[in-house]
Amino acid sequence: MKNISRRSFNTKLSKGIAGTAVLSSVGLSYGFSSGKEKKKLGIALVGLGSYSSGQLAPGLQDAENCYLAGIVTGTPAKEKEWMDKYNIPKKNVYNYENFDSIAKNKDIDIVYVVLPNSMHAEYCIRAAKAGKHVICEKPMAVSVEECDAIIDACNEAGVKLSVGYRMQSDPYTNEIKRMVKEKPFGSVRYVSSDAGYISRGNPDQWRLNHALSGGGALMNMGVYSIQSNIYGTGQNPISVSAQEFSSKPEYFKDTDETITAQMEFPEGVVGNLFTSHNANANRLFVSFEKGWAELNPCHSYGPLSGRTSDGKEIKYPHQSQQKVQMDDFAKHIMLGTTNYAPGEMGKRDMIIVEAIYKSIKEGGKKIPLDLGDMGIVRQ
Ligand code: NAD
């Protein structure tokens, strides 16, 4: 942990009465009682691939409530490069073998697991056992069973858990949530969400290897469509039916190429999902009784863009989604503010992923879902 300016933290705090209300009870353990200094939580990134190097580490340079304190890497050449670039002391550098000794390192408050999907459970559980709060990248794991194991480990260790769902902290997403809740155009009747890109790279990459990814387009991009179908309706689906399409089986040997799914929500609301590793798609359309809202692009790193049926633009100043996401989680830990992407949200999405794969296996059969309010975060 290290100090941050009082001013930047107060700016954040002033935005939420809830945050202020819990300050006296939760803040004490993080040194908020002195009135003189505030703290930044130290994050260690596990896995220094493209997302850590391209988005998370740069986002952390501007973060207000957390900072890049350490790294965990299996590639010795990256150690010096990252230490020099981000001023990380040698004592905060770990590899996969000595990772568990991070338990003794007081600089590290949060471990952020940014590895291939099949490795999330092992490293999240080891981080929890080391007494560190955990951020687990999406998709949370490769099965519901693994999601449960991560949640249980965090509960047993008494640490906080969040999924790397950056969109849940994004202002465009939150504007859609506001419209769904406050109903300026009436109630939602239909939602459609697309998330995909054309994968042309190395056919042996881990995303196309089922043992490492747990699945193809659905596991990688489809979770965004599941997420936006849910925040676009404010409810969990009660059933799902799905279809798979394949046009390049020689390239997508091991994982799904394109999937469409239809979701049924309470009160006759219908959702449509498209995800692909062989088509570019990045859109959310929400149809209300008396109008519509659209985000396009919707799931990328931004700037995003949105509009509504009354001709208005949805527009916010661009900032790093990853910075906002990690700052929100640090604030949740320090002040007890809302956890916008709790473990139950990641588990719920994996239940839906498993139902989609089951439906495809059973020829598009409608699979009932009994999720209640699991993973729905009311703001
Ligand atoms: P990447 O391939 O660029 O990096 C993976 C990292 O894991 C590398 O540092 C690699 O060395 C390491 N690794 C360790 N064991 C490995 C193994 N057996 N095979 C392959 N790599 C291994 O991947 P990435 O794009 O950084 O994705 C990492 C995680 O982050 C994934 O879970 C992905 O879904 C997630 N992600 C999330 C977002 C987001 O917007 N939230 C964006 C990109 C990636």
Image (cartoon, rainbow, N blue to C red):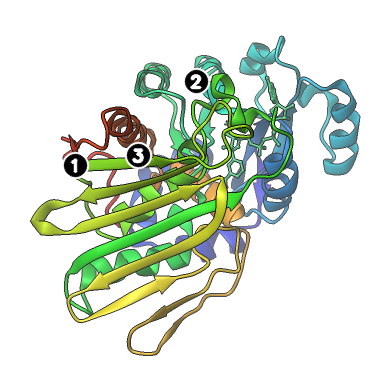
Residue at 80 percent of width and 22 percent of height: 91
Q: Which residue is mark 1?
A: 239
Q: CA distance from mark 2 to mark 3?
A: 15 Å
Amino acid type indicated by mark 2: Ala
Q: Residues within 10 Å of mark 1 (few under 14, many from 20)?
A: some
Residue 323, placed above or below residue 178? above
**211 on left or right of 343:** right
Q: Position of residue 88 (x, y in %)?
A: 81, 35
- Front residue of 270/372: it is 270
Q: Which residue is mark 3?
A: 345
Q: Is residue 285 visible?
A: yes
The part of the image, by quadrant, that contains residue 21 is: bottom left
- Front residue of 32/93: it is 93
**Viewer-nearest of discs 3 and 1:** 1
Query: In the structure shown, which secondary structural element does the residue marked by tag 2 occupy?
Result: helix
Could you tell which of marks 3 and 1 lies nearer the N-terminus? 1
Q: Residues within 10 Å of mark 2 (few under 14, many from 20)?
A: many
Q: Position of residue 373 (x, y in %)?
A: 20, 43
- Quadrant position of the C terminus in the picture: bottom left
Q: Residue furthest bottom?
A: 311
Query: In the structure shown, which secondary structural element does the residue marked by tag 1 occupy?
Result: strand
Residue at 52 percent of width and 32 percent of height: 136
Q: CA distance from mark 3 to mark 1?
A: 17 Å
Q: Which residue is mark 2?
A: 121
Q: Residues within 10 Å of mark 3 (few under 14, many from 20)?
A: many
Q: Answer yes or no: disc 2 within 8 Å of ligand 1.
A: no
